[in-house]
Structure formats: C-alpha cells, structure tokens
Amino acid sequence: MQGTHHTHEGHHTADFLKKFWVTLVLTAPILLYSDLPILFFSWTAPQFFGSHYLALILGSIIFFYGGWIFILGALRELQNRLPGMMTLIALAISAAYIYSVFSLLVGSGMTLFWELSTLIAVMLLGHWIEMRAVQSASGVLKELVKLLPDVAEVVRGNTTALVPIEELVIGDIVLVKPGSKIPADGKVAEGSSEVNEAILTGESKPIAKTAGDRVLAGAINGDGSLRIKITTVGDATFLAGVMRLVAEAESSKSRLQLLSDRAAFYLTIVAVGAGGVTFFAWLFVGARAAFATERLVAVLVIACPHALGLAVPLVAAISTTMAAKNGFLVRRRVALEAARNITTVLFDKTGTLTLGTFSVTSSTSDEVLALAAAVEMYSEHPVGKAIVQEARARGLAVAQAKQFERIPGIGVQADVAGVCVFVGHRGGEDIVVESDRKILGTIAVADKVRPEAKEAVEKLQHMGLSVVMITGDSQEVAAVVAKELGIKEYFARVLPGEKSEKVKLLQAQGKKVAMVGDGVNDAPALAQADLGIAIGAGTNVAIESAGIILVKNDPKDIAKIITLSRLTYTKMLQNLFWATAYNLVALPIAAGALAFEGIILQPAVAAIFMSLSTVVVALNASLLRRRIL
C-alpha cells in the first residue's frame, strides 16, 4: 500500500462493504458445486442443466464486479510507477481467473473458481476494515467541520434573523444562546458566559468570557447568552486555519512512512519475481499447472504489502488526531518525528515563558512618559503599547509624531515637534527616552512570568532535555527571569536577526534544537532549528516557518509534543516489525516450502492470514489512543 491516498483513490469505504456482501452471496453456490463438499462431507450438490458452467458464470461476475476495483487500483499504481498492494492482488486474481477459464474451456476440469471468489471476498473485507480504521483515525477534519452551526442568529434592530453562516460579514452582531455553537470568530459585545473551547485549543476547562473577550468559531457556549461582534469570517477564522493545518499534516509523510513505501515497492517486485520462480519451479518438478498456479496466487496474496503499507500511515493519522486534541497542530509529520531526537529546547522569552503583556511600573516624569507615548503611538511592540496605555490612563496630552522609524532590537524613534526622540534600550534594564541623543529620563516596565512556565521547564528538564532562553531584553532582565524559572543558560540582548545564529551555535555543539517562538520575528530561527514550534496558529509566518503550531500559548505543551513523538516512533517501529516479520515467515510457506510435509497454504487461507496481519497492525496502532500525554 503506497499510502491510502494512492491505493484507494476514488474509492469509498461503503463500496468495499457492498461488493463484499454481493461477492459473499455469489461465492456460496460456487463452494457448494466445488470439490470441497465431496472432499470433506462426501456429498455432491444436485446437478442441473448448465451446472457445469455455474462456477464460470458466478466466478466471472465476482471477478468483474468485486475484483475489478483491484485491477483499476493496479493500473493507477502502474501509471504512478509505484506497483504495490493493488498490483499484487490484481495479478493474483487475474492469474486464477484466466487459468480457470482456460482450464474449463479445454476440458481439464481443474479450476480455481472457489479460491478466486473467496480470495476476492476476503480482500474486499480486508480493505473495508483498513479504510474504516484509517478514516476513524484521521476523521478529525470531519469532526472540526461539524463544530460549525449551519445558521447564525444575527441581531437586526430589536429582532433577530437566522442567516446562513456563509452570509455573515465582519461587524455583524450575533446572538449565541446557552448551549449553542459560536458561528464565527469575534469579540463579546454583551453578556457573560463560560465557553467550551476544548476541541479547538485542548483546554479542558470552560473559559469565562465577558465583554471584550475573544471567542472562536466552533466553541460551545455555556449557560449565559452572548452577543458577539464578528471580527473574522470564512477562511480567515481560527477554525479554518486549524483545518488547513490538519489537512496539510494528513497529506504529508514522515521519514518512516517513506521508508515503508519504499519497502512495499521492493516487496512487490520480490513477490512478482518469487511468484514467477515458484510457478515455473513446480512445473519443472512435474506438478500440475493448477497446483503451480495455486502456488503463484498464494505467493502473490501472502506478499501483499497490506499491513506494511498500513503500519505507518495509521499511526501517523492517530498521532495527528491526538495532537489536535491536546492543543497543538502538526503541520509536517516529519517535524513530529524529529521531536523525539530533541536535546535542547530554546524558548523565546516574551509571550512564551512570559505573558507578553507589559505594564509601566515607574517613569521619571509624566513629561517623559508623554514624549515616549508620542513616539510609541505607531509601534506594535508590547512595550510600546504599554507606554501608550499608561499615558492615556494618566490623561496625558500626547503630541503628534512624524517620520516614525523602528530600530530592530534596540527601539524606535520619531520626530516630535521638530525634535528627534528615541525610545528604547541603551544597555540597561529600563527604557530610555532621549531627545537629540540627550537622556531625558527612563521608564520601567515589567513582563510577568507565566504561572505554568516553571512547571513546563521542570518537566522538560526531568525528561533529560536542556532548556535555554533567548531574548532581546537586557542581561539584568534575562537573569531575573532565568533564575525564577530555573534556566541555567540564556542569551540576552539578541537582535531578531541574530536569533538564528544562536540556534546554529547550539547546533555546532552537537545539540538537536527545538526553537519555540511567535513565528513573526523568530521565523529565521524557527526555520534553522531542527524543530520549529510556533505560538499561535493564526499567523501566516508561523505556519510557513514551523513544523508544529501551538494553539495555546502554553509552554507545557512542548513536553506533550516530545512525548507524543517518542510514542509515535515506537509504535511505528512495532508495526513495521509485525508487518515485515509476517511476510518473511509466510512467503516460503505460500511458495510450498513445506509441501513435502503435507502443509499447503491455499490462496484463500493466505488471504485470511494477510488480512489478519493487517488487523494486528491496526489494533497495535489503536493502542496509541490510550496513552496520556
């Protein structure tokens, strides 16, 4: 199986089940009029005019109705130059059918119609089981789609109107009643309630929402009524972004999956070669053509890389679903696989280990604060916003600034009333305010450490990982935060463009580095790291630069990522073992290596064993769901 994306392209799960039941019903009379009842029960089915051709007629229907789906799959594999499971099944059933028809027409009486029909029935059932397993594992997208309601109750004056969610526009006010789903991203305009965002963010507890708080499409409202002002609709919503990430992860492949695909390809080549050798070897030693064909079909069936092809994709699909339910999204599966080898986690301080919400604790004077606010009015930096907010809170008059300029990693400057004013760092802990390079005063700001950050650092260290912090703040600020969190190594006063160099420095020391950042000014460092983990699934830069996206700004989720990576890799290796060991043992038996002992593996029995190996792999993969991250 070259991944279900190729193997079952254009097929529906229900198709296999329907064809199985029809094939099973048609197989019953073929078995009754075969030599099996005579062999086991000494009983012969009643004969009637044309009964001699019953197996041919029903076998042909089974071949073209039930077996044609495998032949079409084989043609697709050959067109893609990736012969695999479908190719082997198509060769097996075609060989059995063509031989049986030829044998019946020439009057030899030795046919393989009952083997053919039971083989196709078992194969159809096996594929249905496989597709059901994959769909249940990777059904997170369907579950996400179900989160959205069909309509929204939009407030129109003193009344409300039901509007399809596709017709919602930014600025609409929607009424969300208790227990209802939120139709689009927005902010609470009126009311208070607790909202369940578990399937979106992984946060198990309902979150209290009041006026001004952000809410997400698909979340479930609690006991209170909310009026929500829509801020994002359609493909720009958080849920749509999550769905894109999950879809991208499901279409990507890990290194082990690529390895299993190559193994399945080579196994197909070996099986075809072994089947041919088996067929001619039995003819050479004097066996009948029917027996030689039987051995050929058994070899092709037993060697089908069904379990091998399912071994890795099924585990990957389950792990992707588990990730989404635990608050992080896997954009590339190779990134999740790489997480198991990480030795060092490099955290960007602001917004990751700290809340990223600054507040002014002191300033030299109101005049200095007002001048700084004039410059920072155009800044998007959290410190700048804190300064502007404090100036407004104090009711200060803030002048209009011109020629705003950002100096990366240092500060900002602008023209205020004809004077060049600089606001930023000059090597100290406080924010310095300068007028024409003359220091007017300082402003002290503080960024609180996240309550969960210390626990996250301790957990990673307990797992044997080293934790390093990187920040553009001063040495003094970095030292205080590092000490509070128990981090021994940190980089301070690092400009955004220099962060990737620090990643390279750690890598040069032989460390495997996971970089955790906001995905904006950390993009080069995220790309340079062995594993890039971005905070916030809504930013385009984060999506492009990182392999894994954290839905919540919770550093504790980093340990979950590494734990899931280790569990996933172990489960993939276990499945690869079960799949390959089965083929190594069963292939010689199917070829007839134990025929001299009276042990013969019929094609239908070979199909059952092949399907059982697939079930074993599927059950082993499903055990991953029970693990707690």
Image (spheres, helix red, strand yellow):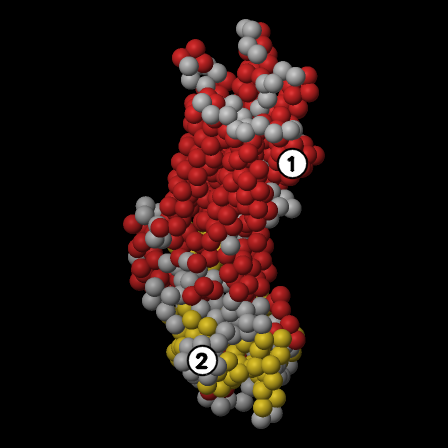
Q: Nearer the viewer, residue 63 or 375?
A: 63
Inspect the image, locate mark 1, and give the three-letter code of the amino acid beneath it.
Ile
Q: Quadrant of residue 481?
A: bottom left
Q: Which mark, by number, is residue 207?
A: none
State whether residue 602 is above or below residue 573: above
First along the sequence among labels 2 and 1:
1
State whether residue 562 is above or below residue 262: below
State whether residue 233 is above or below residue 299: below
Q: Is residue 366 visible?
A: no
Judging from the image, what secondary structure is the residue with disc 2 in? loop
* Residue under pointer 1: 61
Q: Nearer the viewer, residue 174 or 460?
A: 174
- Residue displayed at 53% across by 19% down: 295
Q: Residue 189 in the image: state x and y as whole percent.
A: 51, 84
Name the residue at the bottom extreme.
158
Inspect the image, locate mark 2, and give the three-letter code of the amino acid beneath it.
Pro
* Residue under pointer 2: 178
Judging from the image, what secondary structure is the residue with disc 1 in? helix
Q: Is residue 213 visible?
A: yes
State whether residue 347 is above or below residue 507: below
